[in-house]
Amino acid sequence: MKTPKNHILVIFGASGDLTYRKLVPAVYDLYDKNMLPKNFAVLGLGRTELSDNQFRRKMEEGIEKFALNNTGSALKSKIDTFLQKLYYYAFNTKEEQEYAGFKDKLLALDKELGTENNFIFYLATPPSMYTTIPCHLARQGLNNEDEGYSRLVVEKPFGYDLESAQQLNESLFRNFRERQIYRIDHYLGKETVQNLLVTRFSNTIYEPLWNRNYVSRVEITSAESIGVGSRGGYYEGSGALRDMVQNHLLLLASLVAMEPPALIDSNSIRNEIVKVLQSLRTIKEEDVAKQVIRGQYINSTVKGKKVKGYRQEEGVDPESRTETYVAIKFFIDNMRWGGVPFYIRTGKMLPTRVTEVVIHFKPTPHHLFSSHATIAQQQNQLVIRIQPDEGLLLKFGMKVPGAGFNAQNVNMDFHYTDLADVYLPSAYERLLQDCMLGDSTLYSRGDAVEAAWKFVKPIQDAWKNNKDIKVHGYPAGTWGPDVADELIEGSDLTWRYPCKNLANDDKYCEL
Ligand code: BG6
């Protein structure tokens, strides 16, 4: 296992939630597994005045709550030693003149700890700071790589629309090169998302069928059972299209659809991803109402409890038209996928939390066995479960025992939990480790982000320009607007309505 070079991880926005819940716990998990270099520090930055000690106490709490490796008898002393690697410096990151003081602090720490001028700058701040901070860093020469490396990690959202994403890229490129920029999409950090590539490209049985000749449609669902909670203010200006589709879902679609890369390296894989995104057929503004369904959850009773509608959530306009659900039908215009519909949907306050990809194979050309079965029943399906109950499920026809030749779909399933002693790192742990190693394979490249925004643009425009396009209300705790089923081509066909457990169907379903 490679160990990263000595370095300092500088976190902008260190007094925020992301640092507390995700970043520092993930760094601790790396430390726990001896994956950090000998000389290493986290330097937290923020406007809130905190001493090193106060920062350490707060992070200790975060580690205890959110780190994965937070059990065991040696824990307390291990956390204590780790906490000594955390430092904090308060300053106003908006003000250019304050950066000289920050630079002095950083270089003094670098000298003291022997971190060899290698710095990762992680922007865990509101997006409005994504242009300001890199610019001020560059004025101090901190983008320079003459003596060590300088990397910049940018959290989502990367832009608000195509134009702002282009402007953000341009602004970053003024001072940093593409290879220094790490745009995070935490879905790529998920083991099961990476496994999509392994499933496809390390087995001979799937790849020959993975195309328009054998696949009738592809379905991707990312459902959440929670609402917007305390994030109403952010979500109101975002909506499901920006929050989930432009990034996570289009990325999943790209991994399902991409060609095999020449090599497993950053450029080869990212080249293939971008090719898919550039091949997405533009949905014309006038077709948006037909191909895109949006919805918003309304108050309801879920499992006996009354739950608020979106418009009653804190920070939300009582007349809001922001979508908390979106379903899209689209096509990928290339040789492999020409004519195959792709369906993606995501929503908040749906019956269960589940993310999965379903490959629906075409039925056999001649239906020998099941004259009464519906088309759906005659189709093989491969379900790739991203979360929870991570695994794979293949549905195929078997003979019903007894007289005659009747076929019935049965399940063959694999669950990650069956791999005993396998530790699934958190997405942030994996991604931070990669950035420390200088591997950007699992980060989004600038051209891919722009291509995804380009696809989303006519949908945004249509919703802005045509107020007649409906926002369907759906009761919290249901699968979203009924009309979403009408998107699916073919009589009798609907979305798959998954349960929490991968292989549960036609039976008791735990939500
Ligand atoms: C984030 C979105 O990017 O992804 C959230 O901003 C969403 O709204 C989250 O809840 C979902 O991530 P996961 O890993 O829980 O599927």
Image (cartoon, grey):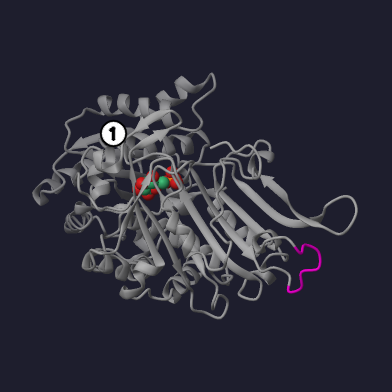
Classify residue 12 by image quadrant: top left
SS at badge 1? strand
Q: Position of residue 78 (x, y in %)?
A: 46, 25
- The residue located at (65%, 76%) in the rendering is 213
22 or 137, which lies in front? Answer: 22
290 or 123, which lies in front? Answer: 290
- The residue located at (25%, 38%) in the rendering is 312
Q: Position of residue 65 (x, y in %)?
A: 42, 27
Instruction: Decide: few, some or many residues near mark 1? Use Cα within 10 Å; few <14, some 14-19, many ≥20.
Output: many
Q: Position of residue 372 (x, y in %)?
A: 74, 61
Classify residue 226 by image quadrant: top left
- The residue located at (33%, 33%) in the rendering is 86
Tell me if 397 is positioned left or right of 385 in this view: right
243 up-or-down from 449: above or below: above
Residue sitting at the far front: 372
Residue sitting at the far bottom: 335
37 or 327, which lies in front? Answer: 327
Q: Position of residue 359 (x, y in %)?
A: 60, 61
Residue 153 visible (yes or no)? no
Identified by mark 1, the residue type is Tyr
Tell me if 136 is positioned left or right of 76 in this view: left
Q: Is residue 369 magenta?
A: yes
Question: What main secondary structure does the magenta stretch of the protein show?
Answer: loop
Residue span colored magenta: 365-371
Residue 300 visible (yes or no)? yes
Q: Which residue carries the number 1 mark? A: 87
- The residue located at (34%, 29%) in the rendering is 59
Tell me if 60 is positioned left or right of 352 in this view: left
